[in-house]
Image (cartoon, rainbow, N blue to C red):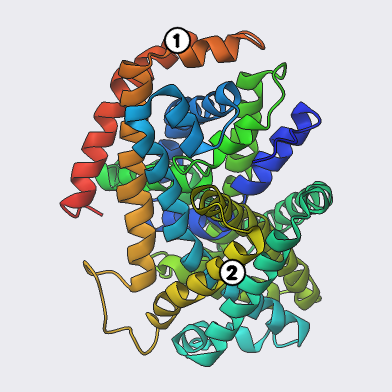
Amino acid sequence: MEKKGFSSRLGFVLAAAGSAVGLGNIWRFPYLAAEHGGGMFLLVYLILAVTFGFTLMITEVALGRKTGKSAIGAYKFLSKKCSFIGYLEALVPMIIFPYYCVIGGWVVKFLGVYITDQGSAATSENYFGDFIGGVSEPLFCLGIFLVLTSVVVLLGVEKGIERVSKIMMPILIVISIGLSVYCVTLDGAMEGLIYYLRPDFEHFGIKTVVAAMGQLFYSMSLAMGIMVTYGSYMGKKDDLEKSVRHIELFDTGIAFIAGLMIIPAVFAFSGGKDLQQGPTLMFVTLPKVFNSFPGGNVVGFVFFVLVLFAALTSAISLMETIVSVFCEIFKAKRTVVCIVVMIVAFLLGVPSSLGFGVLSGVTIMGKSILDFFDYISNNIMMPIVALLLSIFIGWIVKPRVVVEEVESSGTFRFRKMYGILIKYIVPVCMIVILISSIIGYV
Ligand code: TRP
């Protein structure tokens, strides 16, 4: 793989943040927070982000920068016996990508809704359910999203994406802040704000921790090789610890704002009874918000353009990870691999999409098909990878490898804690998470 490298630390932070900030922040975080007790979920998430998230992200980035390789190569480089961890990491995006595109398709549909000025129709009770329950329309939208993603990956216009990210991301932040201020001041939103911000110990439980952990991996694109790859592009002199902190701050900040935008609105429009909506929450609540003020259609349009953009940048890096792995393994041509990945992803996306309609009778472990893939990747695969990674670094190659890499470009203030976390706390917690996931706590 060619190594172009990022031109500056800011370039690295923005590119990594562009990959991390996606549907996970805007779509997934708010519905999980709503479902798992609001303030309690938020608190658990924040604690996990500054401990686990930080530890795992700095490990992955350091591994990448040290070895100059992507996940598969990096593990192989450090230990031949452990190279299977790299392969496992590479498997996770393959599970996520197809269903990620299904949700991306939903965003495309809503963009269409606002372009054609049907914003008020979208507020009717069954609008969203009817749409995802259909066959051709959601599949068509999935196709559009996949083609958009594939075209960019095929063209490899990384420069373009990076440049556009720099413009779009700030706009997304401004619009989200504006909308969240509006939502918080809606009639009846106060109760939602309190629910979202005040931790209520009644909601604390292993279930909350497992959900928050899954979300952390997902949102920060951890345990799937992406941060290793990005680390390998990073400048040798750039401060690693600071960069990782900035990526985390970016990612968590946007998730937090998305929660502020959606949860108070749920209370304002439905008195809180929609909290358990799950994956559909954003698509049901936000149209009501947009419909509630003059010019809401235009804001809805801009909002979904930006969500689409955030989703696309993440989907592109998911697909890029998959494509580069296959190119490496099969030594195949990039174009061919891209097209094959696109077709296979579509076929794998079909059952996830139909799971809300004709296949709604099919449930796996009590979950819809899309939920099942989401669960397998975030609550089972990622803890396994994180467990192996922490044993690998903590006990086999030793934390020194990471510490030295971080210290080669700056101080490592979190050093002492890092050793303890990666050796003891991360593995133990991963085992607990795994067991509770498997015995069906979630
Ligand atoms: N983090 C992305 C989001 O929040 C989704 C994602 C998960 C991802 N894993 C990834 C993106 C790997 C790129 C690469 O939506």
State the separation of the CA atoms marked 2 and 1: 41 Å
Q: Is residue 277 above or below residue 217?
A: below
Give yes or no for contact between labels 2 and 1 (Cβ–Cβ under 8 Å): no
Q: Which residue is mark 1?
A: 400
Q: Position of residue 282 (x, y in %)?
A: 55, 67
* Label 1 CA crowd tier, 10 Å (few <14, some 14–19, many 20+): few
Residue beneath the point at 46% across and 44% down: 224
Out of 241 and 282, give the one closest to the viewer. 241
Q: Examine the image and state in which quarter residue 360 appears.
A: bottom left
Decide if residue 411 is in sight here.
yes
In the visual, does 62 lie left or right of 45? Answer: right
Out of 193 and 218, give the one closest to the viewer. 218
Residue beneath the point at 49% across and 49% down: 329
In the visual, does 348 lie left or right of 320? Answer: left
Q: Earlier in the sequence, mark 2 or mark 1?
A: 2
SS of the residue at dot 2? Answer: helix
Q: How many marks?
A: 2
Residue beneath the point at 48% across and 90% down: 135
Out of 104 and 202, give the one closest to the viewer. 104
Q: Position of residue 240 (x, y in %)?
A: 63, 21
> Which quadrant would the N terminus be assigned to in this image?
top right
Q: Position of residue 428 (x, y in %)?
A: 24, 28
Q: Position of residue 255 (x, y in %)?
A: 58, 48
Decide if residue 269 is in sight here.
no
Amino acid at pointer 2: Gly
Q: Which residue is mark 2?
A: 104
* Label 2 CA crowd tier, 10 Å (few <14, some 14–19, many 20+): many
Residue beneath the point at 28% across and 45% down: 202
Q: Is residue 180 above or below residue 430?
A: below
> Which quadrant would the C terminus be assigned to in this image?
bottom left
